[in-house]
Image: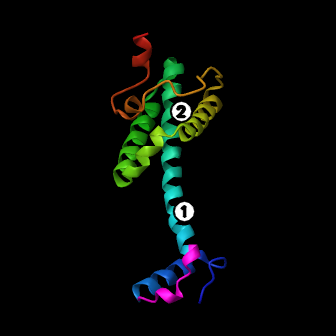
Amino acid sequence: MGTKYETDVVAWANEQARLIRAGRFDLLDLEHIAEEIEDVGKSEKRELASRMAVLLAHLLKWQYQPERQCKSWSQTINDQRIELDYHLDENPSLRTNFDDEKWLKMVWAKAASQARQETNLDCFPPSCPWKMTDILMHEWLPQESLEKK
């Protein structure tokens, strides 16, 4: 085998792709190929978590600092929803994360931490108080839920 995975992953990946296209399956580095394929899924899951945490942090700021609501926050909320829509359309199996309590807890912890750092507030709920359908709905903002209480 030519390029070692540990030496130059980009050159290795290009070489593996050439071998696959040439039908030289006997020369493939199957163990590392399997790892890379798994990493693609992990990367997509990390992007979903990151975008969701940013969205949730901004929804927290929107709800807990109504006097500071601004176009920038509104734009970030809108942008994250658009990107989440696109990401979920491209990777529909990622929707299963919304039913994963461990994943939701991790994303909420990241969002609350970000919101705490940006607001100096320490009053956020220990878990997400909103429904996922609301969070992803483009017109919805959390003050609407406060007004109904």
**Tag shown at residue 30:** none
Residue sitting at x 46%, y 39%: 98
Residue 102 image position (x, y, % from top left): 57, 39
Q: Secondary structure at mark 2?
A: helix
**Tag shown at residue 39:** 1
Q: Nearer the viewer, residue 132 or 113?
A: 132
Instruction: Judge depth for marks 2 and 1 and give the one in front.
Output: 1
Which residue is tagged 2? 57
* Amino acid tagged 2: Ala
Bounds of the magenta span?
23-32
* Amino acid tagged 1: Asp
Say how many tags the image has.
2
Residue 67 image position (x, y, % from top left): 50, 17
* Labels 2 and 1: the sequence-earlier one: 1
Residue sitting at x 56%, y 81%: 29
Q: Nearer the viewer, residue 34 or 120?
A: 34
Quadrant holding the C terminus: top left
Mark 2 → mark 1, Cα distance in angstroms = 26 Å
77 on left or right of 60: left
